[in-house]
Image (cartoon, grey):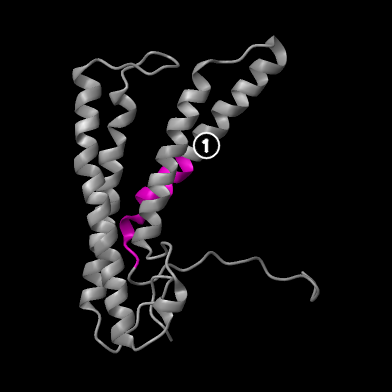
Amino acid sequence: MDSTTSAPATPPVPSPEEPRSLRLEDWLTVLIMALLALITFANVIVRYFTDSSFAWTEEISVFLMIALALVAGSAAVARDQHIRIEFFCQSGTALRRRRLAQLGALSVALLFGLIAVLSVRVVWDDYRFGETSPGIGVPQWWYSIWLPVLSTLIAARALGVLVRRTRETPGEAASPAGGHQP
């Protein structure tokens, strides 16, 4: 390598407080993205050669995109990288930043806990009434069961962030990247 080219980038080092179990979300993201690419590629190939398409690909792709959004949301919450207004989160004392981080984590946990509880009713109704999906006619609860499951995962991740922020000493300030300010 000459002096004009840069060295290869090193992989990011996880924060010491980042949960090791985040590998679950990372692997689910990879798996879902691979399935989406495979399904879409297969549909394009079939459409190119036969002038028709697989009817089921759109329904499966929509489900996978929703699952991907929830899995990625869980990873963002666990890494404390969810959406916030930086003006309020970065200004003020360390105690204020800590309290805002705790309030944010608690709010996310309550919201997704509520979504999980209420969506169980949706799953039960889909099962009880024998609802089927519009595209391929499989039981609708096969899709809807993942909303309470993944919402519970997000709520649990938010509670983990709340616990980590509560255990911080008052002089430590939570940064938006999930680590501590230098």
State the residue position of label 1.
Answer: 34
Residue sitting at 51 percent across and 39 percent down? 33
Q: Residue at x 52, y 33 (%)?
A: 36
Quadrant showing the N terminus: bottom right
- Give how far across and how far down residue 29 sits, in percent: 45, 45
Q: Residue at x 68, y 10 (%)?
A: 50
Q: Is residue 128 magenta?
A: no
Q: Residue 89, position in %: x, y?
A: 40, 77
* Residue 44 as seen in the image, left or right of residue 175: right
Q: Identify whether 68 is placed above or below 169.
A: above
Q: Position of residue 95 (x, y in %)?
A: 28, 85
Which image quadrant for residue 14?
bottom left
Tell me if residue 54 comes above or below residue 33 in the rendering.
above
Q: Is residue 71 left or right of residue 155?
A: right
127 w.r.t. 75: above or below: above
Q: Give the magenta range.
A: 18-31
Q: Residues within 10 Å of mark 1 (few under 14, many from 20)?
A: few
Q: In the rendered image, which quarter contains the C terminus? A: bottom left
Q: Nearer the viewer, residue 80 or 92?
A: 92
Q: Residue at x 43, y 45 (%)?
A: 69
Magenta stretch, main secondary structure, is helix
Q: Nearer the viewer, residue 95 or 75?
A: 95
Query: Disc 1 on helix, strand or loop?
Result: helix
Location of residue 67 by image quarter:
top left
Relative horizontal placement of residue 107, taking residue 13 as reference (left or right): left
Percent coordinates x, y for residue 164 in the rendering: 25, 71
Q: What kind of residue is marked 1?
A: Ala
Question: On screen, 28 above or below 91?
Answer: above
In the image, residue 23 lies in the stretch drawn in magenta: yes
